[in-house]
Image (tube, rainbow, N blue to C red):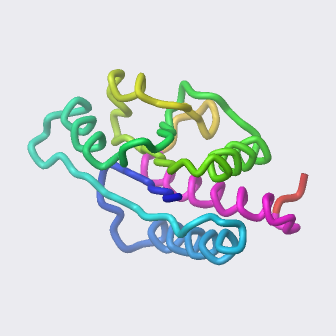
Amino acid sequence: MRIDIVAVGRLKKGPEAAMVADYLDRFAKTGRSLGLPAIRIHEVEDKRGGGMLAEAELLTRSIPDGAAVVMMDERGDQPTSPDFATRIADWRDGARDICFVIGGADGLDPSLRQRADWQISLGRMVWPHMLVRVMLAEQLYRAATILAGSPYHRA
């Protein structure tokens, strides 16, 4: 099993990058005993200014074949953290790779959203795509702690 985050834009050094690195490191340590691999990040950047369609092409090239594709989209489902953890465990138990996709500032091209196995939202508000990385990384770590029975998640 592989878990990837494919995202538009380069996360520069700063608080967001530090938080993403911290949560993904925690996930790797917690997830190892649960059969969850370390998460890999692939960043893409459309330097020609082609908009959502060009970003969609770059993102598509980075999505591993056969992976469950989870689009981070404001119109998506709003699962609870335990529901999110259960879905990850189901894909793990089915030996399926997972790829989380984060679009750029303008969102995801509709053609790419249609490819999703699951579209999830981190709430009804719109978030900057760099903060979505932080919040996704935290939710992945939280999912691992839920699966491990750790007290991090207080229900």
State the residue at coordinates (42%, 22%): 114
Residue 26 at what x, y percent from top left? 64, 74
Residue 121 vertical position relative to residue 5 in the rendered view, above or below: above
Q: Between 53 and 18, which is closer to the camera in this rendering?
A: 53
Image position, residue 109 (x, y; %): 32, 27
Residue 18 percent coordinates (x, y): 49, 74
Question: Between 63 and 44, which is closer to the camera in this rendering?
Answer: 63
Say which residue appears at 25% left-offset and 44% top-offset: 61
Q: Residue 129: horizontal and vertical position, in percent?
A: 43, 47
12 relative to 148 in the view: left or right: left
On the image, which quarter does residue 143 sit in?
Answer: bottom right
Q: Residue at x 30, y 53 (%)?
A: 9
* Residue pictured at 43% horizontal, 64% vertical: 40
Q: Is residue 130 left or right of residue 122?
A: left
The image shows residue 56, relative to residue 40, as above or below, that is: above
Task: Check if residue 102 falls in the magenta segment.
Answer: no
> In the image as oriented, which residue stretches furthest toward the front?
94
In this view, the residue in front, 67 or 51, is: 67
Query: Any magenta on residue 147?
Result: yes
Number of numbered discs present?
0
Q: Main secondary structure of the magenta part?
A: helix
The residue nearer to you, when weighing 93 against 75, is 93
Magenta residues, start to end: 128-152
> Relative to 76, is 15 on the left or the right?
left
